[in-house]
Image (tube, helix red, strand yellow):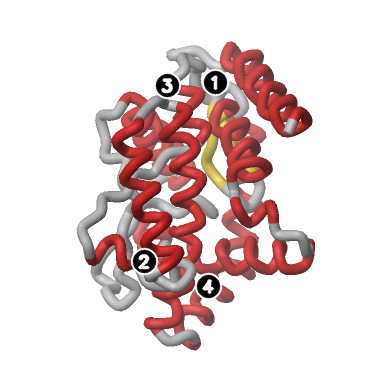
Amino acid sequence: MRVKISGIAISVALALSMTGCATQANKDPLESMNRGIYKFNDTADKAVIKPIAGAYKAVVPSPVRTGVNNFFTNLGTFTSLINNILQLELGKAMDNAGRLVINSTIGIGGLIDVASMDDVPRHKADFGQTLGKWGVGSGAYLVLPFIGPSTFRDTAGLTVDTLYFDPIQYTNHVRVRNQLRLLSFIDLRSQYLPASDLIDDAALDPYIFMREAYLQRREQFVTGQASSEYDDFDDDDEEETPPAPAAQ
C-alpha cells in the first residue's frame, strides 16, 4: 500500500511540475513532436487498428459486443467511483457504487447493464479530472502513441488510473491482463469507426480539430460545464456519431 501511495504522489508531483510547460497563448508548445506522433498514430490506425476494429464489428454479433462493452464499462465504474470519492462527489459516488454492485451481481459480472434498466445514473470520472479539481493546470497538450490526445496532467492521471485504480491491473496473470486490455482497446476503437471517417472527410487539418475538441471537452469536464456521464453508443446505429476517437 505504501508503494502505491508513493506512486500516486510521484504522478501528482510530476503533473504539478509540468503544468508550466504551456501558456494560455501557446497551449501546444510541443506541436512539432505531437504532429509526428499524430501521423504515426494515424498511419498505424489506418493500416492495422481500424481494419481489426472493423473486422471485430463485422464478425462478432451485436449482443456479444454489447456484453463486452458493458463488461469494460462496469470495470471503469470502479475507477470512476474512486475518483468520485477523491473529488468529494459523494452523491455521484453512491450512484456509481450502486451501479457497480447491481451490474456485478445481477448483471453477471457487468455483461448486462441492469443498472441502466433501473435508471441508475452513471458518472464518469478519472484522475486527470481529479487533479484538475484539486487545482492542477492541464499543462501542455500532448499526443500519446496509440492513445492519442492528452495533456501532461491527463497523462499523469491516466498513469494513476491504469496502475492503481483499474481492476484489470490486479489480474494475477500477465497474459490475461494484456488480453483484456487489448480487447478493451479494440472494443473502444470499433465504437469510433463512424466518427473517424467523419473527421477525415470534414476537417481541413484533423490534427487541429482533434486538439481543439479534446482541450475544450476536457476543460468542460473538469469545470463541470459538461455532463460527466459516460457516452452511450448504439453499435447497430451507424448514423449516430460518437465523440472523436482517442486513437486518432
**Callout 3 secondary element:** helix
Q: Crowdedness of circle 2 by 10 Å Cα count: few (<14), some, many (20+)?
A: some
Say which of marks 2 and 4 sits in front.
4
Mark 4 or 3, nearer chain start: 4
Q: Residue at x 63, y 36 (%)?
A: 160
Mark 4 vs 1: CB contact within 8 A: no
Image marks 3 and 1: residues in contact by CB distance under 8 Å: no
The reply to whether residue 192 is visible in this rendering is: yes
Q: Earlier in the sequence, mark 1 or mark 2?
A: 1
Type of the residue with mark 3 = Lys
**Callout 4: helix, strand or loop?**
helix
Q: Give residue 53's mark.
A: 4
The residue carrying mark 3 is 133
Whichever of labels 2 and 4 marks the residue nearer the N terminus, that label is 4
Label 3 or label 1, whichever lies nearer to me, is: 3
Q: Which residue is mark 2?
A: 194
